[in-house]
Image (cartoon, rainbow, N blue to C red):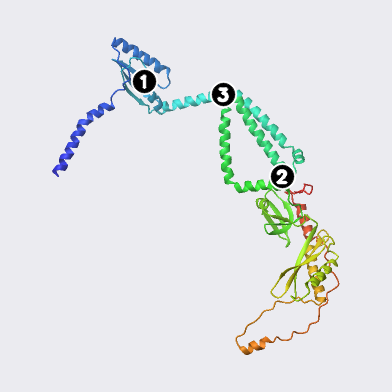
Amino acid sequence: MRRTTFTLFLALGLLALASPALKAQETAPTEPAGTISVGDTAADDLQMAARIRDILAELDGYGGVTVSVRAGIVTLAGEVADQEALSRLDPLIARVEGVVAIENNVRQSTDIAERLSPAVERLVDRFQQVADYGPLLLVAALVAGLVAGFGFWIARLRRFWERVAPNTFIADVLRTLVRLFFSVAAVVVALDILGATALLGTFLGAAGIVGLALGFAVRDPIENFIASVMLSLRQPFRPNDLVEIEGDTGRVIRLTSRATILLSLDGNHIRIPNSTVFKARIVNFTQNAERRFSFLLGVDASADLVRVREIGVEALRSLPFVLESPAPSGWVERVGDSNVEITFTGWVDQTRTDFPLARSEAIRVVKGAIEASGFALPEPIYRVILESPEEEAAAAKPPAPPRREKARPSEAVLDTSHDSTLEDLVHEERRVAEDDLLSPEAPKE
């Protein structure tokens, strides 16, 4: 306890001894660098005080500062409007020749009117500068308006741009680019007249940063827009073409600025984003009029495969909708579990023949011709293993198959003419559609 009390008193004593030195350090006058001259002190002090008052009188914000000089020590008192003026005071006085030290007792004013006066003066100066630049600003604005107006007038020539561009969508894109180009040109001309072209780099840099940020933010819409432009130029399909895109099959209704619209074989609308269409694998079934169908038929493994193939090909040649060139064909595809599978193919003209009906009729005719010639188209055979030996012995003797009369193939050929139902629906859809980028006159890709 005694040691703690002694330590406390010792600390208080040291603090009492140090406080005069700290106070002296805080109130010590500013001492400028250099030697102290020796001369007529009174005359020098008067001249120095007059010189400092003249300097402060020429500067704004020091009207409330009083100056007194004694033995080369400058004492300043009074108030200034802002902190900036206060911080400039000591370095300014120190530059006066003969100043030994500076006692700065100037405070920052708390008077609201005095504090606001410099700001009001600066605001008045700005308005005066704007008034002085008024005629030049008016000329710059007038020239910029003429340049921008000329660009907008060119962009409004819709017929000209639609004649130059391959479709209306590209024409709108070109018109937008023209408006943007002349708007930027108007800003550049106005800044050049005002002599502020240095701001152009800052303006373009800020625009580039904003454009980059927006590009990352709206990447998908921009990608879709660019894909729409490319598809409108390439046009990989035409209206009413039967296509397959990413597993979706249907007839093309129209190409918009955002998506490709298909009419499925079931009569449903399919909307696929253009960014997906542009990168997708597209199968166009109507690009060529001729299209090949194919199907598999399984015959008995012990049958004469050469003869079966000849019978099937001859049956295909007898059909009126199957083209002679390219000629129908057939080949052994593979050996199955209970039969041998043969592939038959034939070509049809899609403009006159309905493809699904033609393939269906070809299967019926070829199957009937092979069976009529005595060749069987066996069904799959499965062996069943039973637990009882007696049942297994009974099952080992298969029952005699029932006698069935051979089905005679019908000699009549079904109507396989082209079905235009879906095409009529597409025409009806296109008749009421306005936003369409597809053009039948555009060059093929």
Q: Are marks 3 and 2 in contact (CB under 8 Å)?
A: no
Residue 391, compared with residue 177, is above or below; it is below
Q: Which residue is mark 3?
A: 131
Q: Of the residues under marks 1 and 2, which one precedes in the sequence?
A: 1
Amino acid carrying label 2: it is Phe
Residue holding disc 2: 169
Q: Is residue 88 left or right of residue 225?
A: left
Residue 369 is tagged as none
Q: Is residue 82 visible?
A: no
Check disc 2 and report its element: helix, strand or loop.
helix
Where's residue 390, x and y in %? Answer: 63, 90
> Callout 3, which amino acid?
Ala
Q: In the rendered structure, which disc, 3 or 2, sits on the residue that comes first in sequence?
A: 3
Disc 1: which residue:
65
Label 1 residue SS: strand
Percent coordinates x, y for residue 58 in the rendering = 42, 17
Is 199 situated above or below 2?
Answer: above
Q: Name which residue type carries label 1.
A: Val
Q: Is residue 405 visible?
A: yes
Q: CA distance from mark 1 to mark 2?
A: 73 Å
Quadrant for the N terminus, please: top left
| For marks 1 and 3 on the same chain, the one whose residue lies earlier in the sequence | 1
Query: x, y (%) of residue 141?
Result: 63, 28
Image coordinates of residue 22 in percent, x first then y, are 25, 29
Judge by depth and name the residue closer to the eye, 417 or 30: 417
